[in-house]
Image (cartoon, rainbow, N blue to C red):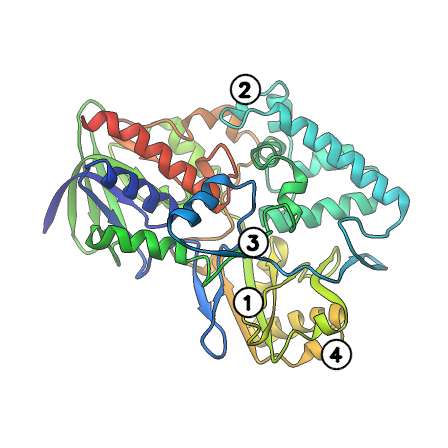
Amino acid sequence: MGKSVDVVIVGAGVAGLVAARDLVRNGADVLVLEARDRVGGRLLNGELPGGAPIEVGGQWVGPAQHQAMELVRELGLRTYPTYGEGEHIAEFRTTRAQYTGRIPRLNPLVLADIGQTQYRLDRIARQVAAAEPWRAPQAEELDRQTFDTWLRRTARTTGGRDFFRLITEAVFSNEPEDMSALWAAFYVGAAGGVDQLINVSGGAQQDRVLGGTQRIALELAEELGDRIVLDAPVTDIDWQPAASGVRVTTRSGLTVRARRAVVAVPPPLAARIRYTPGLPGDRDQLIQRMPMGRVIKINIAYEEPFWRHAGLSGQANSTHRPFGTVLDNTPRDGSCGVLVGFLEGRHADTGSRMDPDERRAQVINDLVGYFGPKARNPIAFIERDWAQEEYSRGCYGAFAVPGALTRFGPALRRPVGPLHWAGTETATRWAGYIDGAAESGHRVADEILPKLS
């Protein structure tokens, strides 16, 4: 059983679908192979009581994410703002603050330390060229150390270090000791600074897509039609360095011959494919050094958004609770109240080892600590452990360990013969986000089109 096309694309997430659409619109014959029984990759809608969609995967878009916002507009989708009216909650060890705006009322020394650490991180991030972070003036020094080492040398208070550990878990879904300081600086710079990453209003969490963010992928798939094959995990890619052509084989035995191939899956999944001949050493070593983050995303539904009646926004952060980041995720129609939060990094590791009832009890206990006894009785508890997803192996995205970028970074986007690499981790802007995935899809289409003429 075989097919022949101009381009075969592995992965029907946003990156693969955007690449396919661009290529098809320019006259290419394309086939997309998706391992799952659905499109969207790390975008996935669940369902609330009553049937309203709720995101259990990637969710928000922000005004500075131009590729994502343009895609939303092109597809005729609408956005609406994340709820943020009322007081936010911040817990730092034994201190609890309820506040409006962006800065909680905490120990002035801790706030000053957070400010100077963020200033230094933003300054370094501006010096790291997003397209080639390994060429940054301090690249070697940064890539020899973990982000934790950099933080310990930079932040001068325990509270300041606690804050940036929380930020690391919330943004990268890993721990500061897991990743290279150069990767952290690249990621911050690719987003335009720390504030862009952590803020709701004006930042990455500002807007939601009406009907759920997976609609982006569903609408792209609608346009591509039968050019997408589901339940088709790719096991083998045969290619020749000097030849124009590839042969891609799925687990079921489907064989696709093409002039070019796009691998649009996260690095750990790309590493699980068998390549013949084997990939060049730098490419192979790079994807061995880019593990996925770990996150369990949980939506907790209530009869109504009771926290709003108490003058709270639903936004809460804590440096000591496992459920350390919470936002209001109530559907626009207000049919029920929803809080969404995350077990990230080490907390996801621990949470994955718990039985479901124990994990639920811990999360509910943290919500009661934030919002009071009314949080104790949800009507639905919808969770997704992305590390348990066979074709994700984690979320939100992959990250580079120390030494990976300066030794092997140039292989991140560089084609290997007829093989091209897409996915949000390869983006130069908003890596790790929907925006970065869209950018990478456009890029590989631009790489391939001249080769087809």
Q: Secondary structure beneath disc 3?
A: strand
Q: Assess disc 1: are there few (<14), some (14-19) or many (≥20) residues with their C-alpha within 10 Å of its C-alpha.
A: some
Between disc 2 and disc 4, the foreground one is 4
Separation of disc 3 and disc 1 at Cα?
12 Å
Separation of disc 1 and disc 4 at Cα?
25 Å
Separation of disc 2 and disc 4 at Cα?
53 Å
Q: Secondary structure beneath disc 1?
A: loop
Separation of disc 3 and disc 4 at Cα?
29 Å
Total numbered badges shown on the rendered structure: 4
Residue 315 relative to residue 133: left or right: right
Residue 325 x, y percent position in the rendering:
66, 58
Query: What amino acid type is highlighted by mark number 4?
Result: Pro
Residue occupied by mark 1: 332
Q: Assess disc 2: are there few (<14), some (14-19) or many (≥20) residues with their C-alpha within 10 Å of its C-alpha.
A: some
First along the sequence among labels 2 and 4: 2
Query: What amino acid type is highlighted by mark number 2?
Result: Arg
Q: Secondary structure beneath disc 4?
A: helix
Separation of disc 3 and disc 2 at Cα?
34 Å
First along the sequence among labels 3 and 2: 2
Between disc 2 and disc 1, the foreground one is 1
In this orientation, which residue lies closer to the viewer: 176 or 115?
Answer: 115
Between disc 3 and disc 2, the foreground one is 3
Residue 327 x, y percent position in the rendering:
64, 61
- Which quarter of the figure has residue 344? bottom right
Q: Are marks 1 and 4 in contact (CB under 8 Å)?
A: no
Between disc 3 and disc 4, the foreground one is 3
Query: What amino acid type is highlighted by mark number 3?
Result: Asp
Residue occupied by mark 4: 373
